[in-house]
Image: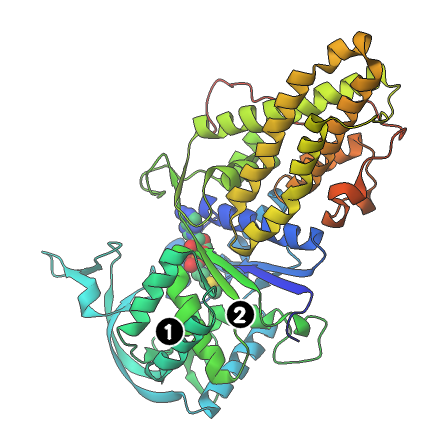
Amino acid sequence: MADKDTYYVTTAISYPNGRPHIGHAYELIATDAIARFKRLDGHEVFFLTGTDEHGQKMLQTAAREGLTAQALADRNSQYFREMAQALNASNDDFIRTTEERHYRACQEIWRRMEAAGDIYLSKYAGWYSVRDEAYYDDKDLALNSDGSRTVIETGTKVEWVEEESYFFRLSSFQDRLLKFYEDHPDFIGPAERRNEILSFVRSGLRDLSVSRTTFDWGIPVPGDPKHVMYVWVDALTNYLTATGFPDIDTERSEFWPANAHIIGKDIVRFHTVYWPAFLMSAGLPLPRHVFGHGFLFNRGEKMSKSVGNVIDPFTLAAHYGVDQLRYFFLREVPFGQDGNYSHEAIVNRINADLANDFGNLAQRSLSMIARNCGGRIPSPGDLLPSDADLLQAADGLVWKARDSIYTFALHIILADIWGVVAEANRYFQAEAPWTLKTSDPARMETVLYVTAEIIRQVAILAQPVIPEGAGRILDLLAVPPEARDFSYLGADGRLSPDTELPPPQPVFPKYVEAASEPA
Ligand code: ME8
């Protein structure tokens, strides 16, 4: 089906060689916001996340911890699942690459690539980084004084590998890939990632080693089980596995091809060169978008266990609040760029944007309605230009948001929504309904109605990012659960005067400085 109404979005699948870190949390939160946005906008959404459990990195960590790789995966995968719950992620499935369904899918895609003549047996001799689970050319490496080699760009250690290996004829896909990028200019985002990939592919592709024989923690190659598949062949195929592949009549089959893979900038090459080439070879349709988000840094430093600045996402969410953390990441960091987080920056966003601008406006206007309008939605009189302008700004938000979500500009969606919140605050101050109460009660009702209507629309639109708090605000406005999707935005879904409201309650509390930052 071409332009179907389904929307399939994924995160990368994480290596469970440790507990989830804030980079994992960030990717999950952003992808969840996209999934929720699309659901609210009328799509049938399938949102997938999970863990990538094979490969040498897992095997080495397990050996260090005195565990089997399977036991390490079982233990840590569970933390990733728990993180999805703790962050209020709405994923529809959680895939583990050690599951039986995934073996079937990988072996089938392998068979198809082989049948297409794109896999051959040879010998690999070259450099491999276990940390990146990636092969490197000499030109990417620095020779150190102790004779070791490291990746110039990242400082990652590499080791020499020499073994029999199956190869994938990546070199023969160069022209097809370049044509595909040209025909689908929005396949890779953001633009700088696209440019990097274009120049990488233009510079020529080498065949890719796609199996290993020196360990067995992986998916056996069909017909030659002393080889296990290269972990990236296995990992990328997870996106197909979850749709029921190779079966074509499952309830999820119609979700392929995926609409969007949301991944970090370090793994764009795997998703935009290898993955489309594997799919082309296997005769399967290609995903529509791959978006490489930036990296998060703790006060500008790369997180690492040795620096001791790895903050646990569970701790952060419990300390600042789940909505608060979600809002902070998506508002503060332009999606696609690197970003920083610090205690001060989080507190500032919580207090300025959520507690003051939005929370206070809701609390002040709803308390006035409770006190002065009998706890019912007031009746608006004739609208003045100030009322109409504000309503028009709110009514236009969903159209802007749809434009922005196309390029995954989550930060712009939030900036636009909060622009209307700022306008609503200026309006509320300027109209001063508390003085109208005695001078012109009818006008007070109009002002409170308009303000409540803006809050309704802002809350509906903010649900993808702050689902809990936005939901509570909609409860306070007595908006029924079935009237909270984007089809109720704009003039069609206006609040009905005289609707009885529950007693108002503050929704976004101010952050009060505790004795210390979260440990
Ligand atoms: O790469 N900030 O797994 P992973 C933001 N298993 N994002 C970050 C980050 C940071 N500091 N650190 C990592 C893998 N990420 C593979 C993926 S997909 C078929 C296989 C992102 O656990 C990273 O870019 O190392 C990736 O998208 C995701 O977290 C999982 O990283």
Disc 1 marks which amino acid? Phe
- Identify the residue at horizontal 77%, vertical 12% (top origin): 436
**Nearer-N-terminus badge (2/1):** 1
Image position, residue 107 (x, y; %): 52, 81
SS category of the residue bearing label 2: loop
User: Is residue 230 depicted above or below 69 in this figure?
Assistant: below
Image position, residue 293 (x, y; %): 44, 52
Of badges 2 and 1, nearer the viewer stands: 2
Q: How many marks?
A: 2
User: Is residue 26 depicted above or below 74 in this figure?
Assistant: above
Q: Is residue 283 left or right of residue 157?
A: right
Q: Where on the image, by quarter, is ligand 1?
A: bottom left
Of 16 and 480, nearer the camera is 480
User: Is residue 404 shown to the viewer in this render?
Assistant: yes
Graded by Cα atoms within 10 Å as few (under 14), some (14 to 19) or many (20 or more), the crowding at tag 2 reads many
Of 65 and 457, nearer the camera is 457
Image position, residue 24 (x, y; %): 48, 49
Q: To which residue does mark 1 refer?
A: 215
Of 330 and 207, nearer the camera is 330
- Identify the residue at horizontal 34%, vertical 59% (top origin): 131
User: Is residue 466 depicted above or below 200 in this figure?
Assistant: above
Image position, residue 192 (x, y; %): 36, 56
Q: Quadrant of the C terminus?
A: top left
Q: Assess mark 1: CB under 8 A from ligand 1?
A: no
